[in-house]
Image (cartoon, rainbow, N blue to C red):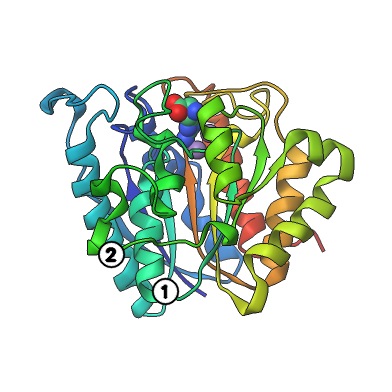
C-alpha cells in the first residue's frame, strides 16, 4: 500500500496545548521506518497549517475557535481527498479529535456511504446546546452526521457527510446527558466499555465491522487514544478510567485490518505535554502497525 502521512497539529478543538505536538511525537516514535518494514511505501505530506490559539480570538464560549477550526477542516479535507484520488492511503495524525471533521469530510468527498468506526472513551456527539465545555473536539461526530452549527456541518459546502446508522462508537464510557439523547435519537451504534466487558472485544469488533462495512461500504477508522485505559495511554487531555487494555486495543486494530475494508485512518489526542517519555505516541505507532497489517506470525 502507498501510505501518505498527514499531520494535523490542531489543539483549537480541545482548548489545551500539547496535542499540537502529537504529529511530531508519533513520527519521532518511528512511524515511517516501521510502516516500511511492513512492506508499505510511505510518503509524508508534512503538517497542514494550524494557527496558534494565542493568535486567535476564542469566539463563542460554546463553540471555541469555530472559525479557525472550520478553516483547518477545509484545508485538511482537500488534502485527504487529493490523497485518496491519487490512490494513496491517508494516515492522519492529530491533533485533537476536531481534525476528524476535515479528514472524514475529505474521505466522504471521494467515497460513497462511508462507515466509521470511532474508537473513543467519548461520543464526540455534542452540539452547542449540549456541550459542557464548548470544546469542538466533543462536537465533531455529530457535525459529520449533519447535526450542530452550520459552519461545522457544511465543510466543503455539503452535508451530511455520514449516515448516523453507519457510525459505530467503540469504548464509550463518558457521555454527556444531552449527548446520550442525541446518540439515541439519531440511532448511532454505541458499544460501551460495559458491552466490551460483557461480550469481549472480539465480538464487539465483529459487530462494529459488520455494521460500518455492510453492503461493501468503505470504512474509516478514527482512533482516539483516550479510548485506551489511562495506564496505557497517559498522554491524553481527557482521560477516563476503565478503558481498553493494551491487548484489546491491538486485537481491535488487527480485526479492522483483517476486514480489508479500511480506506483511511486518524490517530488523535496524543498530548505530549501530559505524556510520559512519549509512551502514548509509541503505543499509537504500535496500534497503527496492527491496523495496517502487522502480524505476529
Ligand atoms: N475528543 C475528545 N477527547 N473529546 C472529549 C469530549 C469531552 C466532553 N464530552 C465535551 O464535550 O467536552
Ligand atoms: Mn474523541
Ligand atoms: Mn475521547
Foreground pick, 194 / 5: 194
Residue 192 position (above or below residue 17): below
Instruction: Report x, y in % for residue 20.
Output: 33, 34
Q: Is residue 176 visible?
A: no
First-in-chain label (1 vs 2):
1
Name the outermost residue toward the front: 185
Q: Residue at x 80, y 40 (%)?
A: 195
Query: Label for residue 158?
Result: 2
Cβ atoms under marks 1 and 2 closer than 8 Å? no
Query: Label for residue 88?
Result: 1
In this rendering, position of residue 174 left or right of residue 15? right
Instruction: Report x, y in % for residue 113.
Output: 50, 72
Q: Residue at x 58, y 34 (%)?
A: 180
Q: Quarter of the image containing the C terminus?
A: bottom right
Give the distance between the C-alpha atoms of the residues marked 1 and 2, in whole angstroms: 24 Å
Q: Residue at x 39, y 21 (%)?
A: 133
Amino acid at each position: 500500500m502507498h501510505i501518505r502521512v498527514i499531520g494535523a497539529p490542531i489543539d483549537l478543538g480541545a482548548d489545551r496545548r500539547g496535542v499540537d505536538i502529537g504529529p511530531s511525537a508519533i513520527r519521532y516514535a518511528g512511524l515511517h521506518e516501521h510502516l516500511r518494514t511492513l512492506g508499505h511505501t510511505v510518503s509524508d505530506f508534512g503538517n497542514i497549517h494550524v494557527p496558534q490559539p494565542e493568535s486567535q480570538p476564542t469566539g463563542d464560549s460554546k463553540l471555541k475557535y469555530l472559525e479557525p477550526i472550520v478553516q483547518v477542516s477545509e484545508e485538511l479535507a482537500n488534502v485527504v481527498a487529493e490523497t485518496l484520488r491519487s490512490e494513496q492511503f491517508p494516515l492522519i495524525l492529530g491533533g485533537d479529535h476536531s481534525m476528524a471533521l476535515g479528514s472524514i469530510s475529505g474521505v466522504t468527498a471521494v467515497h460513497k456511504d462511508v462507515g466509521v468506526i470511532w474508537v473513543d472513551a467519548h461520543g464526540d456527539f455534542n452540539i452547542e446546546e449540549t456541550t459542557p465545555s464548548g470544546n469542538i473536539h466533543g462536537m465533531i461526530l455529530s457535525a459529520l452526521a449533519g447535526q450542530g452549527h452550520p459552519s461545522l456541518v457544511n465543510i466543503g459546502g455539503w452535508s451530511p457527510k455520514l449516515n448516523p446508522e453507519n457510525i459505530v462508537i467503540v469504548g464509550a464510557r463518558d457521555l454527556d446527558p444531552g449527548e446520550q439523547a442525541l446518540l439515541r435519537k439519531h440511532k448511532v451504534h454505541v458499544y460501551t466499555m460495559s458491552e466490551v466487558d460483557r461480550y469481549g472485544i472480539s465480538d464487539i469488533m465483529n459487530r462494529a465491522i459488520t455494521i460500518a462495512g455492510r453492503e461493501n461500504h468503505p470504512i474509516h477508522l478514527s482512533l482516539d487514544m483516550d479510548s485506551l485505559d489511562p495506564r496505557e495511554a497517559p498522554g491524553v487531555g481527557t482521560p477516563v478510567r476503565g478503558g481498553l487494555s493494551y491487548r484489546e486495543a491491538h486485537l481491535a486494530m488487527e480485526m479492522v485490518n483483517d476486514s480489508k475494508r479500511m480506506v483511511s485512518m486518524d490517530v488523535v489526542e496524543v498530548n505530549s505535554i501530559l505524556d510520559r517519555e512519549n509512551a502514548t505516541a509509541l503505543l499509537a505507532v504500535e496500534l497503527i502497525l496492527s491496523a495496517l497489517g502487522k502480524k505476529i506470525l
